[in-house]
Image (cartoon, grey):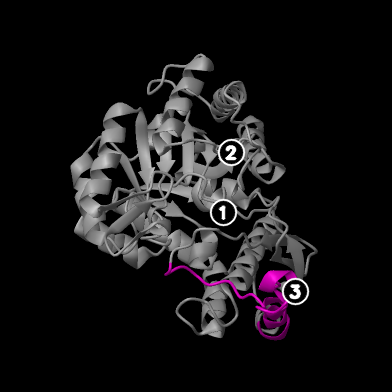
Amino acid sequence: MTIHSLTARRIWDSRGRPTVEVEVTNEDGSSGIGIAPAGASRGTREAVELRDGDARFGGLDVQQALRGIEREIAPALLGRDAADQAGIDATLIALDGTPNKSRLGGNALVATSLAVLHAAAAQAHQPLWRHLAQGRPVRLPLPQVQIFGGGAHAGRRVDIQDFMVIATGARSFAEAMEMTAEVYRAAGALMQERGALSGVADEGGWWPNFARNEDALDTLVAAIEKAGYVPGEQVAIALDIAASEFGHGGRYRLALENQEMDSNAFAERLLRWVDRYPIVSIEDPLAEDDEAGLVAFTRAVGHRLQVVGDDYLVTNATRVREAARLGACNCVLIKPNQAGTVTETLAALRAAQELGYGTIVSARSGETEDVAIVHLATGWNAGQLKVGSFARSERMAKWNEGIRLETRPEAPSGFAGRTALARGR
């Protein structure tokens, strides 16, 4: 069965910004839709969005990307078999012809690639996760959920980008959601009691109103306790430092505390946090240009901690293998729009799994109602899922999809739970 039509349209993401949606329809009438998300903090090596750069919507319109799909991508894909994901993605990469997807745009390519994937699953009359699993037993992922948003997600009110919780004591996806809901509510109540409640950030986490970065960690521990859980045993902390946002050339500047330090001093501060707080995962602890710092930090934490590479690894299989050779990180954040196509995304995830690294499929700060990443995390048996917070419909659509998958008659074979966390493998 071949692709009969391919339609591209401009829709709007969770920040009210233009993004690209592609709909692929097969000859039998089955179809799939793919939508490109957009990040706020981005690695310099990730696929580049194509934006118009003119006066409309602050330069963020996507008419050029839509024209590229209409004039080049659609003609090349019509008549192709949607089930040939690798072949179609290779065609997309060749059509673009640049190393960073900048000519046609990473947003155009990832929306098209995801639409083809959905269309293939629909053609096979299978839910997307099952189509991806290809008969292998897979488990629902362990969620990482933002409680406080910071960094580029919250006007840089605090330096650290994400203060998250992981329900390490949960025995099911639904229970992880229940536990997270209680912690989220408790954190909001604590902020309100202190007169520090200022709404929510980009991804739905409580807007930070702290004098020090450590204040957010103290409040998070208090929220876990207020919700009735034991910190570190039932609910643990995960951080996305997003250090590339404030670290360059081996120097790190914390604006909130008006401090500047070198790589070693900043790593030592993070290690003190690990000793003091129930932290089980730290993403991008050092900047993407501080490879030596990342290697040293990974060695320093040993088997105690999951060290996640995002800006440094940019969902790239080659970079994952090089990081493993050097001993940098032990877990990889997987973002389809960072790679540009489904095939490249899967290659990075498989490389990580083969090397014994943990994997986390992740949303972006600019999201939509698309729930594809829940199916990717499940069908590829990634083990972990990072969507944002426990608020805003573009986030809850994804968390709720996980609950649906768990409760349907033909459900995945289990829940990954705390065993999915990488520990210096």
In the image, which disc is placed on residue 262? none
Residue farthest top in this picture: 228
Q: In this figure, which residue is indicated by the disc labeled 1?
A: 364
Q: Is residue 335 left or right of residue 71?
A: left
Do the residues under discs 3 and 2 have CB atoms within 8 angstroms?
Answer: no
Q: In this figure, which residue is indicated by the disc labeled 2?
A: 205
Q: Position of residue 326 (x, y in %)?
A: 20, 59
Q: Position of residue 260 (x, y in %)?
A: 31, 52
Q: Which residue is nearer to you in this view: 52 or 4?
A: 52
Q: Position of residue 289 (x, y in %)?
A: 31, 64
- Residue 78 seen in the current view: no
Question: Residue at the location (55% across, 27% down)?
Answer: 180
Q: Which corner quadrant holds the N terminus?
A: bottom right
Instruction: Check disc 2 and report its element: helix, strand or loop.
Output: loop
Q: Earlier in the sequence, mark 1 or mark 2?
A: 2
Q: Which residue is nearer to you in this view: 71 or 411?
A: 71
Q: Earlier in the sequence, mark 3 or mark 2?
A: 3
Q: Which residues are magenta?
A: 44-72
Amino acid beneath label 1: Arg
Amino acid beneath label 2: Gly
- Residue 379 seen in the current view: yes
Instruction: Locate residue 315: give its quadrant.
Output: bottom left
Q: In this figure, which residue is indicated by the disc labeled 3?
A: 56
